[in-house]
Structure formats: structure tokens, C-alpha cells
Image (cartoon, coloured by chain):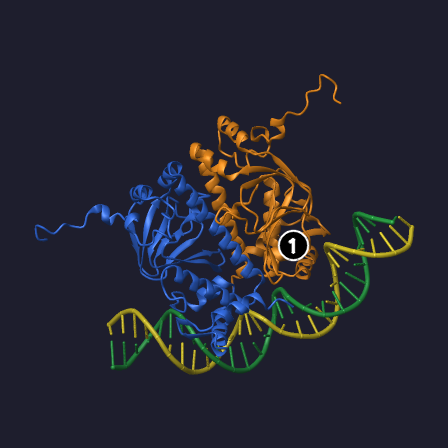
Chain colours: A blue, B orange, C green, D yellow
DNA sequence: GGTCGATATTGACCCAGATCAAACGGCTTG
DNA sequence: CAAGCCGTTTGATCTGGGTCAATATCGACC
């Protein structure tokens, strides 16, 4: 029983609060005024913890909300009837999940936490409502969707034209850049996904991913120990990307 | 000089008119009431013809509008500095082009007409304005963007996990289905793109595409003469997709 | 703190599709 | 209607990454 002058955690603080969130600048509130962010606070329908290995949603689930990652790390994947599957993306704090469901009113991929995570639930009907009123929110939401399309085009490029080592270099540089944007080290990070998941995302087998990691290490570009990666020569990785095919 | 009682084509009729357009059910107006479609008429900022081989927009162009294809056929592609390029999609009548530009205010890919085409210009600021007022338009626009994301995931799946013949089968079935939705024959159609463009889209070399076409013909699944394709055994093509990897 | 299953590394071999090369067909142009 | 060109087909060969297999290593759970 709490002492009389201890204020119990209020429901509203449990119910998320974009205005208090340190991901403001990366997440949906980006570009909104104080006032507008306060309106977002009302919109967010609470938080939800998702344990490592658990689904946030599954292909076929009814679509009702999109989700902002408060903390943690996710993958999305698609499963074909014949058992083949493909990781379509990895998402980290501040990124939005679930937009695949808008088009058909049910989700078309699975979203799985790769570590214990927490997300903010954004009921979609209310998001549309508010974005009819708040121009900046409408704009930003459209930008978020568009960037997802552009990101996917980048992955198509990667899968369609790049060689194994280029793919992995692009992947590492992308992760590094996103960690940097979140205030983490650009050089050193912990991979939350397995070699198999990386391979699935990059259209490669896990052995090929492992070999490419080893090769990069031999060449002094990175150092790897299992999931721990340190980038020693970022410029070298970039060079791997740009040249190569200039035959 | 026209005879006195010949009414010259009015500017408004030149200025497109969703309410008159037979693509209503496929395009942006889908799901809108008569009244709401009339509002769309005002929004559409005119039409533009794009000759075969010409660009509708280029990567780097300022983003101002999205485009609805009134008639014709387009491809979008991305060009890397080193000369490699990848076709990211083929678009036909009723489909929307240009959403890649929303996120950054400039286009991130090239859009090129594969036959003489005509598009409706939809200034984006005005689309956002109107979709703040017309709920159904807002909803449908979000669905169109979401479906683009889902389509891209499908292509990622194709590029990441499928073998050459599966890719081509998926491609042909997809085209067939889209032609059908437009009232054309599901069995017989004219490819607007070259083997090289198909290959680029599917992450294959043109020779591999050509060989896969020949193989399908030998197997009695289709008949091909250059760009003319007739699907003889659609079920057979579908079988190629679903099974195979059930090892 | 030892056991066990999941994950990762490394090696040997193989194959689907790339590459190189030649010839052909159908279109446009003079 | 011949010439030339682009796109396509087909054949021969090569190779990057897949496949199969053997260890090694880690982390979770008794």
C-alpha cells in the first residue's frame, strides 16, 4: 500500500505521451507543434509490451491500428504456403509498423519482436480523423508511407542487382546510419537478428552471410564476434557498394 | 475554322474529368460518391501526353504532383551511379505514379512511357487539401499507398526466394490479372516491355527470360511470338508457383 | 555449473543462371 | 526492296552462391 503522499502512476502517463517521448523527432510527431503533439497524446491508444519472439500482429489479422516502436527491435516477414518465407524488413525505435494493413483491412505480413519491446498503439481510424484536422500530421504520415515505398525500392535494387558482399555492406551501413540517428555508436552495435534472418532479408543463405562477414573481417573492414559488430572501415564498405560493377 | 454550330472542345473537358472517365472504378475516384467525384474533377490539374520512350518525371525532379494513368503503359526504374539500373515496376491505366516523391519532395525514380500515353496530373497539395475534406478520398488514397507497399513486398519475395521460372510465371499471372481487371483478355496480351526490362524487373538477365519463355512454350503453358503472349494453361503456371519448394 | 538445442563458422562440391558468342527475325529508313 | 539495327533466340561455357556436412560456440534452463 503506497504512502499517502505518493502519487500513483496516472492512467494517462501509462497511456503513452508523445509529448514526453524522446523519440519525438524520429517518430510520428516529427514536425508538429507542441499543441499538435498534445493532440497526438489523446490519439495514442496505449502501449503494449511484446516479448522477444512474440508476434505484434500476423498476416491475416484484422487491421485496426498502426504501431510506433517505443523501444525494441522487430522484423516483418511473409510466409508462402509452400513454407518459404522472406524477411521484408527490420524495424527499430521510432519506426512505424503495420501500414501493410491499410490497403486491405487486414495485415499482409507478420511482425515479430526480436527483443523484448514496447510499442504505442495508434488506432488508424483516429489517426485519419486527426490528420484531417492537423495538416502537419497528415503531411508527415504521407511522408512516412512514401519513405516506406522508397525503402522497398532500395531493397528491390539490392536483391535485383547486387552481389552478396555488396548486399551485406549495404545492410551494415544502413543499420549503422539508423543507430546513429538514435544516438548510438555508428561503429559498434549488436545485431538483433540471426544470420538466417539477415540472409532471408538479403536474399542469401545463412552460410553466404557468414562467409561474407568472415571475408569483411579478413579484409579489415569490420570485426565480428557472433552478433557483435564493429565497423573498422566504413569508407571501405561504401567503396564496395559504389564501384564493383563499373566494368 | 469550325462551322458556327460546332461546339469547340471546352477547356474543362480537356482538363480531365474523373466523372466521365471509364477508369473511375480502378483509379483514385474509387468508392467516392457522384458529388465527391465532381470535386475531384476540379482537383485534377489537366492532362499530359507522354510519348513512348519519354520521361514523365526523373529521379531528382521536384515533387509536385502524382499522376493517374489515363491510357498507356509505363515503367519506373532506379539508376545507380555505377550504371546499374533496376526496373521497380510497370504501371498501366488507372494506376497511380509518383508517390515515391512524397517523402522527400523530390522524385527518387524515373518514370518512362513504354507506349504513347496520357496521364492526369493531380497536384499533391490540392489532393491533401481535398482529402482533408473528403473522408472517402483520404481513405482510398491511403489504401493506394498501402497497396503499393504490399506490392513491393511481393516483389521482394519474388526476388529473394523464387527461381527464374517461378518469377516469370508470377509476372505473367500478375499481368494477366491486371489486364483482366481492365476488360482485356486474361489469356492474350501484348508485352509492352523488352526482355531486358522484364529481366531487370525480375532480377534476371534477358537471356534467362528468353529461355524461360521458350521453356514455357515447350511445356505447352503459353505461346509466345516476340511480344505477343497467349496463356494456354494458367493453372499450370500457378502450379509452378505454389509447389516447387515443398521439398 | 553442466547439458542441450540453437546459432555460427568453415570446407567440399554442385548447379542455376550469368556470361560470351553467334545467328536470326522483324521493324524502320532511305 | 535492300540495308541496318534493335530485340530475341539459342548454344557453349563459367562461376557465385547454394547445398550438404562437420564442428564449434553460445546461451538458456535445470
Q: Position of residue A192 (x, y in %)?
A: 38, 65
To which chain does the residue with label 1 belong?
B
Q: Is residue B81 visible?
A: yes
Q: Secondary structure at mark 1?
A: helix
Q: Is residue B246 above or below residue A26?
A: below
Q: Residue at x 36, y 64 (%)?
A: A184
Say few, some or many: other residues with alpha carbon within 10 Å of mark 1 (under 14 / 14 to 19 / 20 or more): many
- Left-right relation of A115 to B104: left
Q: Which quadrant of the figure has residue B98?
A: top right
Numbered-mark total: 1
Circle 1 residue: B197
Q: Is residue B162 at least partly visible in the picture?
A: no
Whole-percent x and y of residue C13? 58, 79
Q: Is residue A194 above or below residue B167?
A: below
Q: Depth check: A105 or A185 in front?
A: A185
Q: Looking at the image, which is closer to me, A17 or A1?
A: A17
- Residue B120, picture quadrant: top right
Quadrant holding the N terminus of chain B? top right
Q: Position of residue B49 (x, y in %)?
A: 66, 39
Direction left: furthest residue: A4
Amino acid at each position: 500500500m503506497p504512502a499517502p503522499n505518493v502519487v500513483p502512476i496516472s492512467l494517462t502517463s501509462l497511456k503513452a505521451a508523445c509529448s514526453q517521448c524522446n523519440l519525438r523527432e524520429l517518430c510520428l510527431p516529427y514536425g508538429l507543434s507542441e499543441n499538435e503533439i498534445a493532440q497526438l497524446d489523446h490519439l495514442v491508444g496505449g502501449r503494449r509490451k511484446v516479448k522477444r519472439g512474440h508476434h505484434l500482429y500476423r498476416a491475416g489479422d484484422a487491421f485496426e491500428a498502426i504501431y510506433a516502436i517505443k523501444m525494441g527491435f522487430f522484423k516483418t516477414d511473409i510466409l508462402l504456403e509452400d513454407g518459404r518465407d522472406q524477411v521484408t524488413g527490420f524495424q527499430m525505435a521510432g519506426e512505424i509498423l503495420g501500414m501493410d494493413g491499410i490497403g486491405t483491412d487486414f495485415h499482409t505480413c507478420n511482425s515479430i519482436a526480436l527483443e523484448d519491446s514496447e510499442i504505442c498503439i495508434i488506432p488508424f481510424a483516429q489517426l485519419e480523423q486527426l490528420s484531417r484536422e492537423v495538416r502537419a500530421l497528415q503531411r508527415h504520415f504521407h511522408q512516412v508511407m512514401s519513405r516506406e515505398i522508397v525503402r522497398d525500392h532500395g531493397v528491390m535494387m539490392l536483391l535485383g542487382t547486387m552481389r552478396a558482399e555488396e548486399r551485406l555492406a549495404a545492410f551494415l551501413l544502413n543499420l549503422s546510419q539508423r543507430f546513429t540517428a538514435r544516438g548510438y555508436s555508428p561503429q559498434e552495435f549488436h545485431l538483433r537478428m540471426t544470420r538466417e534472418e539477415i540472409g532471408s532479408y538479403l536474399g542469401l543463405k545463412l552460410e553466404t552471410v557468414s562467409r561474407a562477414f568472415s571475408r569483411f573481417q579478413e579484409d579489415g573492414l569490420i570485426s565480428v564476434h557472433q552478433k557483435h559488430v564493429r565497423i573498422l572501415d566504413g569508407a571501405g564498405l561504401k567503396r564496395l557498394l559504389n564501384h564493383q560493377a563499373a566494368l
